[in-house]
């Protein structure tokens, strides 16, 4: 006899744990199968909820970005404010320890929420079988069979490994390793100048590492609006990040003390030596061993096939998060989790895939929502745009954060907002004004007529909206 639940979620990352909490709130008897185990500072194995995001993704990366930014401020910026500090140094053990503490508090918090919502956390590895059965192999290798009316697959993703640089977790590392280095590398090579590569490169470059990023594509951050990626690249280069575009890593060889990388670019083949090489070429969904062949789970290439509402080809089986189509972002997975739980409860639920905020937590930050100018042009949309530089913002000047700009794209005919793009301080927070506006179908005129407090960085959004109709106040309209 198998133990029966209303809802079983396989995977306890931001997609899965959120789905489980919402399902429990809706009155379902819910379980979440999660296999993640961390090793604490005493070498003890600690099972953890929260998935990639809380353990080795969003949260620890932001903790290290914050610490390394404080170091940069203390070393380079405070003197400009007349603040004198001497003997600025960095204690890596303290910095990594702080990050680990944050992770442990947050993952522990999810476990508390599970308890409070009476969600059973089944610790082990889950596999879908036919007839909505889930087999769990526990950490002690015991195998238990469960069944449920509804099963939500949320097994997430892992870093892609490439044969040109196989990860050995010593010299050639992945993003999880880069979040736990015990000493500052002298020279760090990064393969891939995407979101994760840039964030990790920023952390270590701020602490004094000489970093070179190799990006196979000729365009920098091709999915961002080109005005934004162009401006961001300028700032990153000024900070000393050496970003080589059109540079493909083709092989590598590891010795006891370093790693040699062969790179192919327009000028031919070159070799570089690093003490560490970070592979940050993207992530791949975890689909291996999640379903028995007899369950007949349909795939779309590397991802589990779902329709618009996240249902798979098997009635009562759903899939959400990094495992399915769409951007690999924590908040996208969480929204799908909520929506699926509500659909199971017979409620109407909606995820607006056209209004997903994207953020890159570099300095300056990059954030956008909606379409880029390139996409609008490819789709043949007639558009008008307005931009405003932070250099013309009083608040940005007072903060010493004048890098970057806001760019607004609106439909030329209806004025409806199509995309909002920001590179600058606090872009990660500022973007949400645009997210709300776009969710409510606002026009650029709507943003332009909303009063914004002075002096704030948000005024740059207001001015960019005014600039769409060439009536920005604090720049000369062209
Ligand atoms: P995951 O978080 O990967 O969780 C899946 C869980 O399923 C894991 O805990 C895994 O152990 C478990 N699992 C897998 N197979 C099984 C099985 N068979 N049985 C039981 N359990 C299983 N996104 C953002 O939105 N913002 C950011 O700032 C951001 N920063 C990032 C920084 C880094 C360095 C990385 C690596 C990623 C970052 N991401 C960020 C991406 C984000 O982490 C993912 O999009 C998000 O975690 C996906 O959520 P998920 O629940 O689908 O999968
Ligand atoms: P992202 O998808 O944002 O994680 O970015 C990963 C980046 O890695 C992409 O921009 C790829 O073009 C890049 N990339 C993949 N393989 C290689 C390689 N062998 N050498 C250099 N860059 C690569």
Image (tube, helix red, strand yellow):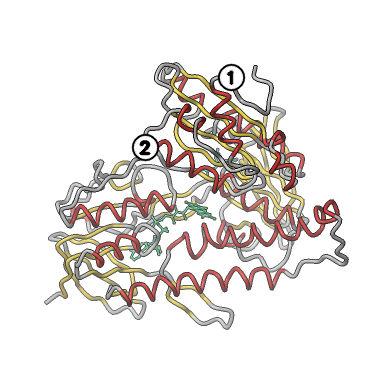
- The picture quadrant where one finds residue 262 is top right
Q: Is residue 450 left or right of residue 235?
A: left
**Residue at 41% from the left image edge and 16% from the top image edge:** 413
Q: Specify whether residue 294 is in view.
A: no
Q: Which mark is residue 470?
A: 1
Asked if residue 22 is positioned above or below residue 391 in the image, the reply reads below
Instruction: Using the image, tell me which numbered label, if any, was put on residue 440.
Output: 2
User: What percent of the width, then of the height, locates residue 49?
Assistant: 41, 69
In-front residue for pair 228/456: 456
Residue drawn at point x = 64 percent, y = 69 percent? 96
Quadrant of residue 404 in the image? Answer: top right
Kindly identify which numbered label has been placed on residue 189: none
The x, y position of residue 341, in whole percent, is 24, 57
Mark 2 C-beta to ligand 1 under 8 Å: no
Regarding mark 2 in the picture, which secondary structure is present there?
Answer: loop
Query: Can residue 420 be seen in the rendering of this structure?
Result: yes
The alpha-carbon separation of the residues under discs 1 and 2 comes to 24 Å
Q: Neighbour class for label 2 at 10 Å: few (<14), some, many (≥20)?
A: few
- Is residue 173 depicted above or below 264 in this figure? below
Figure quadrant, ligand 2 = top right
Report helix, strand or loop for mark 1: loop
Q: Earlier in the sequence, mark 1 or mark 2?
A: 2
Q: Quadrant of the N terminus?
A: bottom left
Percent position of residue 403, x then y: 70, 39
Contact between marks 1 and 2 (CB within 8 A): the answer is: no
Residue found 58% across the figure and 58% down from its top: 61
């Amino acid at each position: 006899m198998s133990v029966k639940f209303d809802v079983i979620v396989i995977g306890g990352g931001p997609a899965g744990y959120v789905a489980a909490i919402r399902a429990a709130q809706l009155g379902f008897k819910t379980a979440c199968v999660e296999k993640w185990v961390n090793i604490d500072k005493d070498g003890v194995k600690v099972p953890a909820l929260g998935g990639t995001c809380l353990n080795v993704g969003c949260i620890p990366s932001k903790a290290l970005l914050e610490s390394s930014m404080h170091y940069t401020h203390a070393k380079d910026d405070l003197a400009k404010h007349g603040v004198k500090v001497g003997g600025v140094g960095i204690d890596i053990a303290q910095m990594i320890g702080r990050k680990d503490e944050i992770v442990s508090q947050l993952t522990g918090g999810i476990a508390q929420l599970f308890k409070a919502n009476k969600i059973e956390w089944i610790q082990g590895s889950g596999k879908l079988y036919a007839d909505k059965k889930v087999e769990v192999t526990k950490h002690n290798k015991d195998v238990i069979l469960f069944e449920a009316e509804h099963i939500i697959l949320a097994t997430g993703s892992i870093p892609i490994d490439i044969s040109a640089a196989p990860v050995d977790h010593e010299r050639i590392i992945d993003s999880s390793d880069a979040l736990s280095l015990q000493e500052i590398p002298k020279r760090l090579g990064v393969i891939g100048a995407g979101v994760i590569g840039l964030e990790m490169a920023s952390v270590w470059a701020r602490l004094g590492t000489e970093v070179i990023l190799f990006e196979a594509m000729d365009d920098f951050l091709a999915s961002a609006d080109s005005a934004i990626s162009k401006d961001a690249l300028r700032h990153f280069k000024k900070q000393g990040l050496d970003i080589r575009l059109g540079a493909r890593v083709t092989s590598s060889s590891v010795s006891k003390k370093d790693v040699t990388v062969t790179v192919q670019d327009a000028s031919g083949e070159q070799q570089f030596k690093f003490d560490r090489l970070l592979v940050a070429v993207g992530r791949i969904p975890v689909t291996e061993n999640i379903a028995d062949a007899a369950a007949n789970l349909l795939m779309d290439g590397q991802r589990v096939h779902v329709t618009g509402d996240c249902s798979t080809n098997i009635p009562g089986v759903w899939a959400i998060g990094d495992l399915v189509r769409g951007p690999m972002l924590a908040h996208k997975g969480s929204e799908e989790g909520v929506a699926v739980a509500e659909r199971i409860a017979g409620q109407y639920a909606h995820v607006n895939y056209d209004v997903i905020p994207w953020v890159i937590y570099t300095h300056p930050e990059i954030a956008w929502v909606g379409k880029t100018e390139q996409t609008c042009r490819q789709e043949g949309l007639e558009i008008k745009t307005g931009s405003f530089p932070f250099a013309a913002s009083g608040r940005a000047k007072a903060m010493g954060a004048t890098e970057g700009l806001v760019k607004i794209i609106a439909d030329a005919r209806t004025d409806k907002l199509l995309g909002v793009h920001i590179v600058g301080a606090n872009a990660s927070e500022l973007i949400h004004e645009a997210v709300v506006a776009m969710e409510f179908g606002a026009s650029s005129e709507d943003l332009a007529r909303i009063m914004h407090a002075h002096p704030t960085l948000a005024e740059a959004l207001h001015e960019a909206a005014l600039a769409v109709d060439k009536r920005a106040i604090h720049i000369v309209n062209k």
